[in-house]
Image: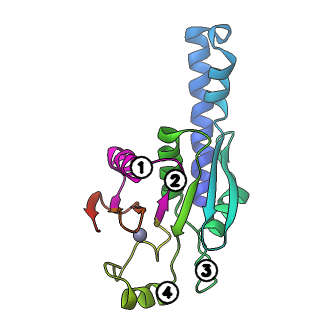
Amino acid sequence: MDLNIVEKAQTVGISRRNFLKKSAIITGAAMMTQSEILAAVGEKKVLKLHNVHLNKTFYAPFFEKNYYKLSGLFEVNKAFIDYRAKEMTRIDVKLVNLLYEIKQHLGYDKQFNIVSGYRSAHTNAQLRKTHEGVAKNSYHIKGQAVDIYVPNVSLRKLRDVALGLKRGGVGYYPTSHFLHVDVGPVRTWRRG
Ligand SMILES: [Zn+2]
């Protein structure tokens, strides 16, 4: 994990504290409800990720009290494992946050089922031979893409939420029943 992310989180933390001080002066801290204070001081972000190939669920609290939690991000990396190559990578925090934002639109209890997370270059090359539409320089290789579905949520709804956020690529695969999301340039496609 590069320190940059931690430093950035700390900077955000400091400026949020200053903001809180100011807003406390303006509104008076007594006027803030407890949940408002909690939300402002220490938003806790958790993802529940189920790797369908391992049939294993990972609970990943990755952000708390203005800091990224490396242990939580590590759980994300584990859930995204390339099960063919048995290799892990560091998943881009932008993608982790994107999943969290999607979850906020779907419901707090929702989990993401991961069909394909990280892919080693070798795995991606193998998949290109057997599967149509696998990109050569896939964002999956960079830890910046994931193919998902959400139990009890229609794929169409999941797609619409992802499209609405405009954070990167959204590929709709209704026949294979998954949605591809990545944090590359904003674009969209449908296959199947
Ligand atoms: Zn994909």
Per the rendered image, the range of residues in magenta is 147-171
**Alpha-carbon span between mark 1 and mark 3:** 25 Å
**Alpha-carbon span between mark 3 and mark 4:** 9 Å
**In this rendering, does residue 1 appear at all?**
no
**Alpha-carbon span between mark 2 and mark 3:** 20 Å
Local SS, label 4: helix
Q: Earlier in the sequence, mark 2 or mark 3?
A: 3
Depth check: give the residue in front, 70 or 124: 124
> In the drawing, does residue 24 fall left or right of residue 71?
left
Residue ID for mark 1: 158
> In the drawing, does residue 180 fall left or right of residue 190?
right
- Find out whether residue 148 is within the magenta segment: yes
Query: Is label 3 in contact with label 4 (beta carbons under 8 Å)?
Result: no
Query: Is label 2 in contact with label 3 (beta carbons under 8 Å)?
Result: no
Query: Is label 2 in contact with label 4 (beta carbons under 8 Å)?
Result: no
Q: Is residue 63 above or below residue 189?
A: above
